[in-house]
Amino acid sequence: MQIYTLPAPNLDPLQEALGERYRFETGANTLERATLLDTFDGRLRSAALELRHSAQELQLLPGRDSAVAPRSAPCAQPPEFAEDLPVGPLRDLVEPLIEIRRLLPVITWQREVTSLRVLDRRRKTVVRGELARAQFGGHTSTYLEIRPVRGYDRALARVREALASLEASEAETTEGEALARATGHLWSYDNKLRLTLHPEMRADLAMRLIHLRLLDIAEANIPGLRRALDVEFLHDFRVALRKSRSGLSQVRRVFPEPAVQHFKEELRTLFRRTGRQRDLDVFLLSMPDYRGALPPEAARDLDPLQSYLERQQAAETKDLDRLFRSQRTRHTLTSWRDYLESEIPTRSLPTAAQRPIHEVARQSIHRIWNRVLRDGGRIGETTEDAAVHAVRVQIKKLRYLFEFFRSILPAEAKTAIRETKRLQENLGRFADYSVQQQQIRSLASDLASGDWSNAKTLLAMGQLLPQLEAGQQYERQRFHQTFGRFSSAANQKLMKGLLA
Amino acid sequence: MTAIQKSKPANRPPRPRVLATYSIKGGVGKTATAVNLAYLAAAQQGARVLLWDLDPQAASTFYFRIKPKLKGGVRKLIAGGSKLRSRIRGTDYEGLDLLPADFSYRHFDLDLDDLGKPHKRLRKLIASLADDYDYILFDCAPSISIVSESVFRVVDTLIVPVIPTPLSVRTLKQLRRHLNKNGLSVPVLPFYCMVDRRKSLHRELLSQRSQADLEMLETVVPYSTWVERMGLERAPLAEFAHRTSAALAYRELWWEIWDRLQKS
């Protein structure tokens, strides 16, 4: 598929340039409203795809660099989640990309559309296309979309030649994206840091940049989490907050201690107050897995639990909205930003503030790396779960430091980061199984004390516990393997070299 | 004790799904079914579909205004798979391509036999198109031959139109016996088509359609002059008569077949 921009919606010059061998045949002229759909983090645009809903049809259109063939399927309403997509190959392509994220309308624009075909002398369609006059926000463009018909390459080449002779230019992107870009409506949210630091940059300045980027990420998610658009808004918000807290505690003597203590406490409070909602989100996301782990009749017995959780979640969403409307929260976030954007003091600076960031980064990574090696090495068969959790928290902090300073670490750091990630995932699953068991126990008491359940529900929940315990044990056994790789002589040698 | 696993995205059906419209008996609406179902798979689901015309009469090819011409004939096609892609032609409809038949298909049996390993050859050709299509639909010629035997071995499902007449029903039973006898486990999805409720014979047989041994699909495609007009319009029903009972029935039929495919 190729898209050209034309100076005017007039095909006569093109017909003339095509000659007599091929003829354009145009279909009815229709007026439609099209909506460009994408997730908040632009997953479809990243995959060079445009999902467009118009006139009861959903179209998946490939961008210039996409090898995907265009797909369309009837769809009465714009889909919101993957399960709303029409079944079939279009859904098979989109679902793994968007996962649990909501499809949001990026822009809705007017299209005056004329379908067209290029016919050969036998009246066989040899090229398909569409002429569209698109209008949005005072911006108007004319697009000619050309779709090849397999086996008729000569005709396609002829159409392209004709377009070239008319100086029609090939569009860089799909229609919706071009309009959104031209009118400043294209989202640019990305939950990755993607910061390039200079190794000699003073540490306090570098850390301010990192914290500001994290704050941008956190704040970008607030409107979405307040409206509970999807669970990833809250998740990304909390991860950004957690990274900032970790940065404040792990990269030491960069900011004055009173400021560090103050903001650590403020961010911790905010983080904790969003915890209950995240727990509910995670539990509800796990419900299909829980049902799948039970025999069908027992799976149905979890229905009261699902209703209970959904009601709790709805109440929590309201609380969360209140939390983000509150003076206290607004003050936490604005004062944190004010601090990060304030003038850098020249006197009474903490000891590491003016040191080059690469030195401070190495020192910080080194410290936590050694701690993980020490504490991880002590984990044995009989060690308490709490100690394993503590190692998990340290590993997470190490991951965050790698992420902060990725741009100033040598390329070889990749291997160490990979092993850290593997270990973090292993311990993450261990923690999930553990938390889920605690939650089931606690929910069982809640349900038993209310009118929400019957014995069957509690029995079904009870059946989940041994399976979660088995999962936790499996991950614990795997820890020795993943930690073995993490602490291998080769990885230690590599880290020693990196941190020297 | 097994641990609860985090669910992964549901397993996608293997691509491409390979179907065939087939009947031992001719004139039962096999090609009209192939043309309409292939069109609906592309139009209703945004699927990429290849309709492979295996019938030397090249009726599917005709319906889509494509020249019944296969450069080098069918022998060259099956002897060297690399030529396959260049023989495919796009139809007038988005997502729907056709591999045309020509008169050389009358020797397809002999060619397949001569070249050896017929179904393996066919399977290899299908595999070479795996990245291009979600569905490949064979429109078979009415006979039991080396070609149809090969098709039985490579398809996921056989779609069998049956007119509610004793002879047509008998050929369905013959087909099932043949498949059983030869150890072919391909699922057969028969459905009644060209049903004329004015005929008492049709009504009588339809009333027995719940009888278990026939295992007919629920959808019934009525007799319709609109289906005959497909030859004049040279287009699938939904393109020129989408509100007619036959067009609606084909749409129902596609969803019923799709549903069965998901369960298989």
Image (cartoon, rainbow, N blue to C red):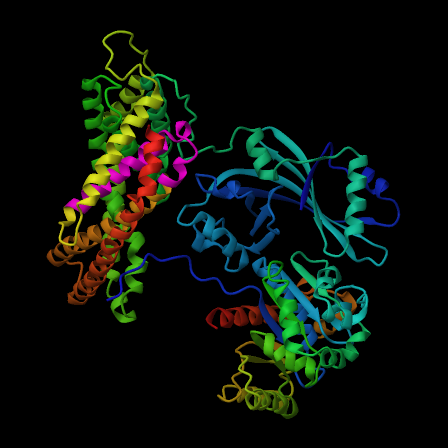
Report x, y in % for residue A190: 43, 35
Out of A357 and B29, give the one closest to the viewer.
A357
Give the quadrant of residue B27: bottom right
Q: In this view, does A75 lie to the left or right of B58?
A: left
Out of A364 and B107, give the one closest to the viewer.
A364
* Picture residue at 29% right of the left edge, 31% below the top: A365
**Residue A210, above or below A454:** above
* Picture residue at 32% right of the left edge, 22% below the top: A359
Q: Is residue B224 left or right of residue A166?
A: left
Question: Is residue A407 within the magenta segment?
Answer: yes
Question: Is residue B81 within the magenta segment?
Answer: no
Report x, y in % for residue B42: 62, 61
- Is residue A278 at least partly visible in the picture? yes
Report x, y in % for residue A391: 21, 42
Secondary structure mainly formed by the magenta segment: helix
Out of A188 and B82, give the one closest to the viewer.
B82
**Residue B187, above or below A71:** below
**Residue B220, above or below A31:** below
* Picture residue at 45% right of the left edge, 48% below the top: A98
**Residue A13, above or below A473:** above
- Is residue B204 at least partly visible in the picture? no
- Which portion, as a residue range, is magenta? A387-416
* Picture residue at 75% right of the left edge, 62% below the top: B87
Please tell me how many numbered marks the rendered image carries: 0
Quadrant in which the C terminus of chain A is drawn: top left
In this view, the residue farthest toward the top is: A347
Report x, y in % for residue B163: 64, 84
In this view, the residue farthest toward the right is: A20
Give the quadrant of residue A450: bottom left
